[in-house]
Amino acid sequence: CFSFLPWLLMEPSLAKRTPEASAPVSRGHRLWDKYARRAACYYLQGHAVDDPLVSPALTPAELITKWPPVLLHAAEGERLRLDVLEMCAVCDAAGAAISVEPFPSRLHVFQALPTRLSRQSMQSVAAFLNRHCSVAPSK
């Protein structure tokens, strides 16, 4: 399982293990939060913000232990990096296999741009999938 800059915790104040997730944020992050609330309304579709189906960082440990290995990529200067930190803490506490790779960027889903960083990210995902997924050669 892998994700680029995932939104894993719909309400940052619910962070249990990462105090930084509920710390004061910069002006840029406040702007993100304002528009994220709008996007969340469309995404949630009536689900509660603490529902693990929409906030995977709130998944109970007994379910997390059943997950496949997880790879998360995060831009170091992007707001959702806090979700990645929380997810990492949750997976670590449950004993689940998780790899987090930070990238020196502020852009959300920087992989969409044709840059050196996006190539590095894609190569990392390919290596992760090759390590964890066995695919029979086609004949």
Image (cartoon, rainbow, N blue to C red):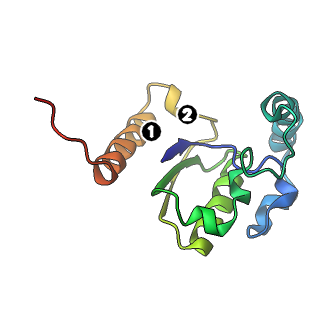
Q: Residues within 10 Å of mark 1 (few under 14, many from 20)?
A: some
User: Mark 1 falls on what kind of element?
Assistant: helix
What residue is drawn where x is 49% and y is 55%?
70
What residue is drawn where x is 24% and y is 42%?
135
Give the numbered dot on residue 117: 1
Q: Quick check: 57 left or right of 42?
A: left
The answer to whether residue 5 is visible is yes
Instruction: Look at the picture and state if 14 lies above or below 47.
Output: below
The answer to whether residue 89 is visible is no
Q: Quick check: 7 left or right of 38?
A: left
x, y percent for residue 53: 71, 46
Label 1 amino acid? Leu
Q: Residues within 10 Å of mark 2 (few under 14, many from 20)?
A: some
What residue is drawn where x is 58% and y is 48%?
74
Mark 1 vs 2, N-terminal side: 2
Instruction: Look at the picture and state if 119 lies above or below 8.
Output: above
The residue pinned by badge 2 equals 110
x, y percent for residue 3: 54, 43
What residue is drawn where x is 73% and y is 46%?
79
Q: Quick check: 88 left or right of 43?
A: left
Instruction: Find the distance from the CA under tag 1 to the CA under tag 2.
Output: 8 Å
x, y percent for residue 12: 82, 54
